[in-house]
Image: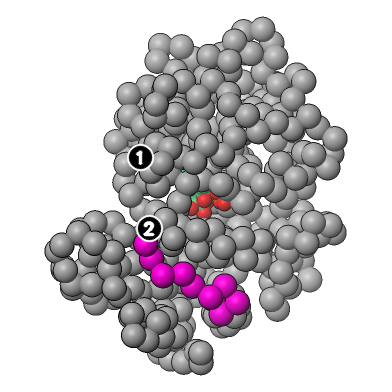
Amino acid sequence: MEIKLTRAATNRTRPEDSALGFGQVFTDHMFVMDYSKDAGWHDARIVPYADFSIAPSAMVLHYGQAIFEGLKAYKTPDKKICLFRPRDNFERMNRSAKGLCIPEIDVDFVMKALKQLILLEEKWIPETLGTSLYIRPTIIATDPFLGVRASNTYKFFIILSSVGAYYAEGLNPVKIWVEKHYVRAVRGGVGEFKTAGNYAASLIASEKAKKEGYAQVLWLDAIERKYIEEVGAMNIFFLMKDELVTPNLSGSILPGITRYSVITLAKKWGMAMNERKISIDEVFEAHASGRLLEVFGSGTAAVISPVGEIRYGEKKISIGDGTPGKTAMKFYDALTAIQYGKAEDTENWIQVIG
Ligand code: PLP
Ligand code: COI
């Protein structure tokens, strides 16, 4: 399929790297294509970043049939553009598509489209460590129809955003709130897919946590409210004296690409790395006995994010001394060195696109 290009009339300038937060600055262009039963995915185009026109009855607005991805492009010191495991994101998008009854995309084709879009938007890739070009591929259901069924038409788009740190804390440890009442997702539902509704379902607890001074929610399993699942926008790791633990993929948590990368590095470094059930009680017991050394989250937006405090009902524990833990920093340094082209890409995670 050919990709038609319509250039933006005006070219804006990128803010200073130091002024970048997360997800507020969008580039000049976006990639769009549409789907219909007859034509399949068609009308691939790169167009100026602008509002869409969709019907007020568009099914996505009513029933949330929407999936998205998040990945990043990095600028290396020698001005190369690197993508981190991009095919894994589009393959996960296809798993989300299946789960939400959305037609799959051709991974090779969207990779080609993404590359073309990024090369056009190169000036929007910031260069300082900790900044990057965040890439947000999305699919929404567009049938103008109020009955509940899978849509017959869809829009796929990729927008780009120059970003800095996801958390205001930057690399400083964040405080997380263990939610006792609300749940995010349940096994057999859509928790393992990157679909809009999971985030909508998370808001009420996130707002509560924020009011209490916590950056994000740590979710427990929806059935026993006992086992740890993940944090709002990242997976979670616990460094014990004798092992590094992350919750196993239960069907209700997002299989994070950063999570896989941390697991791979941990095994490579000879750490005792376990994907297993871990209860919130075990975490508090490990803290009491001195076994719990560090806690950190992993995600594309969050990178590696040290956790300095966990609150569970009336109980609260502090982890570390207020500075990022050694192991969290080791993962942060190793991952970012690969992403920014400063270390050899021994795992074949990087795709250089220009
Ligand atoms: N969990 C949730 C709910 C997320 O939104 C994200 C972010 O994408 C992650 C985990 C981490 O996934 P990844 O490492 O693929 O970015
Ligand atoms: C990501 O890390 O890419 C995410 O999607 C997290 C969040 C911004 C929803």
Provide the residue span drawn in magenta: 101-110
Residue 233 in the image: x percent, y percent?
48, 44
How is colour applied across the structure in the image? one colour
Q: Circle 1 sits in a helix, a strand or a loop, which is it?
A: helix
Q: Identify residue type, mark 2.
A: Leu
- Regarding residue 293, the answer to whether it shows in the image is yes
Residue 174 in the image: x percent, y percent?
53, 32
Seen at 46% across and 20% down, the residue is 226
Residue 191's place in the image compared with 16, above or below, is above
Residue 294 in the image: x percent, y percent?
67, 25
Residue 67 in the image: x percent, y percent?
40, 60
Q: Residue 249 carries which label?
A: none
Q: Does the residue labelled 1 lie within 8 Å of ligand 1?
A: yes
**Quadrant location of the C terminus in the rendered image:** bottom right
- Regarding residue 16, the answer to whether it shows in the image is no
- Front residue of 281 and 252: 252
Viewer-side label of 1, 2: 2
Seen at 58% across and 32% down, the residue is 247
Residue 273, image quadrant? top right
- Front residue of 93 and 127: 93
- Front residue of 354 and 139: 139
Residue 37's place in the image compared with 197, above or below, is below
Real-space CA distance between mark 1 and mark 2, rounded to the nearest whole angstrom: 18 Å
Q: Which mark is residue 100?
A: 2
The answer to whether mark 1 and mark 2 are in CB contact below 8 A is no
The residue beneath circle 1 is 202
Q: Circle 2 sits in a helix, a strand or a loop, which is it?
A: loop
Q: Which of marks 1 and 2 is nearer the N terminus?
A: 2
Q: Does the residue labelled 2 lie within 8 Å of ligand 1?
A: no
53 lies left or right of 272: left
